[in-house]
Image (cartoon, rainbow, N blue to C red):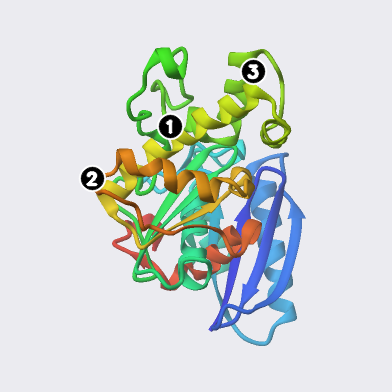
Amino acid sequence: MLRLGLDIGGTKIEAQLLDGLGVSLLCKRIATPTTGYGDFLVAITDLVNEIRQELDGPFTIGIGLPGAIDPQTGRIKNANCLLLNGQDLKGDLTKALGQRVWLANDADCFALSEAVDGAGEAGRVVFGIILGTGCGGGLVVNRQLIVGPNAITGEWGHNPLPGYDPALDGPSQPCYCGRDNCIERFVSGTGFAGRFVERHGRGLSPIGIITAAAEGDVEAEAHYDHFIQALAHSVASLINVLDPDVIVLGGGLSNIDRLYLDLPQALTPYLFSDRCITPMVPARYGDSSGVRGAAWLPSCVEGATTWAI
């Protein structure tokens, strides 16, 4: 069976068609419509129908999006593609396309892609972490995406930073979710750069901070060290609860090479163990993991509520 994945982003929508072995057969991209929800539905429908015309056989459809699906109503919420919020995207696309569709958060799709045939394929329990604009996550067990009754599995970025100390971590950080000092405010790419401005009055991008640290900038190196400690404390909490076989990292900060040496070394003091042997590896498919995971959704959803199936 062929599998079509759609990855909805704030500026573009990517479609990839995979065969049963995960080989990419086709890739298309269109701009994400911003003129209204109706135009968005038309764009998706036209894209899928265009692909249908190029193929002889049927395919399943999975969709990843940067938001949450309300488990009670099935409607989208907290999406940065604002026109999706409050909409029954699954129901509307099912009607428009004349076939069943599957939806999931983009971080879940990332984790699924890397667990099925990516960097975590050898593991039974795989946790995927995205360190990008936000701080998302997803849990896959035996190549099945785990979706709990509250539809928040993997949302580790909205736990409070373990051991938060104003003397070390700075002033309390309000999060858009309404809580304070969420992990995301400290270890996402946005948080990493924003905290550097707050602490040192200098506006550098995440890669700029890392480059400055490598060139001997004392403030940049100290800021990176704080980031590693915050990330280690947070990831250790995950390992203490889940003890996954592998953790796969994605997003912009996952491209920091030294992270894969520094993070495992920093974890041990926070673990209920005398050492950490959990592999922490970069994603195999990089930016394509989201769309590939969406393609795998129809056969890889475990314990899902009705919106996911």
> Does any portion of residue 91 appear in the rendered image?
no
Q: Looking at the image, which residue is at 56% across and 59% down?
A: 283
Q: Which of marks 3 and 2 is nearer the N terminus?
A: 3
Say what amino acid the circle numbered 3 marks: Val
Q: What residue is shown at x 29% (from left), y 62% (from top)?
A: 303
Percent across and percent down for residue 251 are 59, 47
- Number of the label disc, if any, that sits on residue 183: 1
Sort mark 1 into few (<14), some (14-19) or many (20+) by Cα contacts within 10 Å. Answer: many
Mark 2 to mark 1 CA distance (whole Å): 20 Å
Contact? badges 2 and 1 (CB < 8 Å) = no
Q: Which residue position holds label 3?
A: 197
Identify the residue position indicated by label 2 in the image: 272
Instruction: Determine the residue located farthest toward the left in the rendered image.
Output: 272
Query: In this rendering, which labeled residue sits more in front, label 3 or label 2?
Result: 2
Q: First in sequence, mark 2 or 1: give its number.
A: 1
Does dot 2 land on a helix, a strand or a loop?
loop
